Image: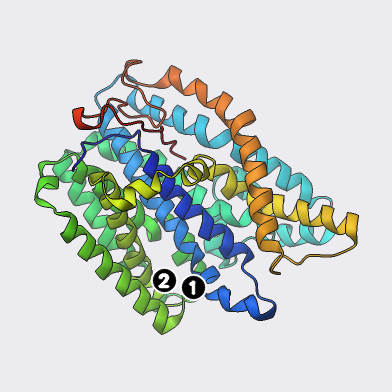
């Protein structure tokens, strides 16, 4: 059973859960004791960020296509993104900045790197590319992906406004081709560019563009020519290619093979996974992604991403003060502590900080009240889905 384009999909929150859970494990995977064998999975956890990029490209392209003829198109889009992203981002950034002032070593390390001001200007990924060094204070580390998305949000609405759908498709395909070529060029002709290949916006446009292509696919007649078996076979082939790259060089994001063709293989796999979910909602995969714990995890994924580092540190510090037992950031105990503390922090953030602010988005919908959904697209479901309970998916 196929489905027409719709943003109110609980399974998209399920996909966000599949994205955020390995990212957290990537930051806390055990490196001590016999559990260190799991580090190979932890090293691959960065791939969850690429799934986030795919989802962002899909949702943002869909929102823009559905509102491009509306009044105040660009203003509404930017304001709605600002309401969704900025409050928690800048609250965390202020807290992180004040926190490093309490530690002379952290303050000195951040100053040597370039200072927190780069993140206030949403240019932290540019600074990391320039220095070829990620931020030395962990809490600032995950922010690079938000810099990429914000830079993408600024110019992409103009692209969608100026291009026809066919030309938009050609533009996105060009981005998918150009990004790995740029990464290869940086590898061959410039030294010390490993971080740049990972965090520079033009180098990661293949992921966002592939998400956009999925949005175009589900809104085009071509979707009727694609079968579940074909999409599954292509997804399996892309996943096999990703596995082979990992087998040759390991799952580390900085290896030459992974940071050139590997990223694109990961992105193609994620894009095909998304296609399977949105076009075939009756598949076992889509049904599993509507499992309530996964949906809730995806709903609070933004808070989990920003808060898991400081929440883990705070919980481990409190345990150390009370018991005298110090827990390392990559010890076995740090894994459950990090997940539990992250869920507590993100849940509180969602219910008491993010949700009240998100109500302001209704004033900048660009659509009638009956059409607006929490993800910024049409909430109406096609007839064959109208009676099914579907939880609203929150774009982050």
* Residue in the picture at 41% in, 36% down: 393
Q: How is the model colour-coded?
A: rainbow
Q: In the rendered image, which quarter is residue 186 located in? A: bottom left
Q: Position of residue 214 (x, y in %)?
A: 25, 48
Residue 114 in sight in this render: no
- Residue that badge 2 annotates: 259
Q: Report helix, strand or loop for mark 1.
A: loop
- The numbered disc on residue 254 is 1
Q: Position of residue 91 (x, y in %)?
A: 66, 37
* Residue in the picture at 33% in, 25% down: 73
**Who is closer to the viewer here, 242 or 279?**
279
Q: Quadrant of the N terminus?
A: top left
Q: In the rendered image, which quarter is residue 263 located in? A: bottom left
- The numbered disc on residue 176 is none
* Residue in the picture at 69% in, 49% down: 341
Point out the residue furthest to the bottom here. Answer: 248
- Alpha carbon of mark 1 to alpha carbon of mark 2: how far? 6 Å
Q: Sequence order check: which comes first, mark 1 or mark 2? A: 1
Q: Position of residue 342 (x, y in %)?
A: 65, 49
**Who is closer to the viewer here, 393 or 165?**
393
Q: Report helix, strand or loop for mark 2.
A: helix
């Amino acid at each position: 059973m196929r489905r027409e384009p719709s943003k109110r999909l609980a399974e998209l929150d399920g996909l966000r859960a599949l994205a955020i859970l390995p990212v957290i494990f990537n930051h806390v995977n055990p490196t001590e004791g016999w559990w260190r064998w799991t580090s190979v999975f932890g090293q691959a956890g960065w791939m969850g960020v690429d799934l986030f990029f795919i989802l962002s490209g899909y949702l943002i392209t869909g929102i823009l296509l559905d509102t491009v003829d509306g009044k105040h198109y660009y203003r509404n889009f930017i304001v709605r993104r600002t309401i969704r992203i900025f409050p928690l981002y800048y609250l965390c950034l202020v807290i992180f900045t004040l926190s490093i002032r309490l530690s002379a070593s952290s303050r000195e390390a951040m100053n040597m790197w370039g200072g927190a001001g780069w993140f206030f200007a949403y240019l932290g990924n540019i600074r990391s590319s320039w220095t070829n060094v990620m931020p030395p204070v962990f809490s600032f580390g995950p922010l690079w992906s938000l810099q990429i998305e914000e830079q993408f949000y600024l110019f992409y609405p103009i692209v969608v406004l100026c291009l026809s759908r066919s030309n938009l498709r050609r533009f996105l395909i060009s981005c998918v081709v150009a990004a790995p070529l740029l990464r290869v060029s940086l590898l061959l002709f410039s030294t010390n560019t490993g971080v740049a290949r990972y965090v520079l916006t033009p180098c990661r446009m293949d992921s966002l563009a592939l998400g956009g292509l999925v949005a175009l696919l589900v809104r085009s007649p071509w979707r009727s020519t694609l079968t579940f078996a074909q999409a599954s076979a292509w997804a399996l082939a892309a996943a096999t290619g990703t596995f082979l790259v990992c087998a040759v060089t390991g799952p580390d994001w900085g290896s030459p093979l992974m940071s050139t063709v590997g990223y694109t293989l990961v992105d193609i796999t994620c894009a095909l996974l998304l296609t399977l979910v949105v076009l075939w909602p009756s598949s076992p995969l889509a049904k599993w992604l509507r499992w309530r714990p996964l949906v809730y995890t995806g709903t609070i994924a933004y808070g989990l991403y920003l808060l898991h580092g400081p929440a883990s540190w705070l919980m481990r510090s409190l345990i150390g003060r009370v018991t005298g037992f110090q827990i390392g950031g990559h010890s076995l105990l740090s894994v459950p502590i990090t997940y539990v503390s992250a869920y507590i922090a993100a849940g509180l953030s969602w219910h008491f900080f993010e949700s009240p602010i998100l109500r302001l988005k209704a004033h900048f919908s660009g659509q009638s009240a009956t059409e607006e959904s929490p993800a910024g697209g049409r909430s109406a479901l096609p007839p064959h889905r109208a009676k099914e309970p579907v939880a609203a998916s929150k774009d982050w």
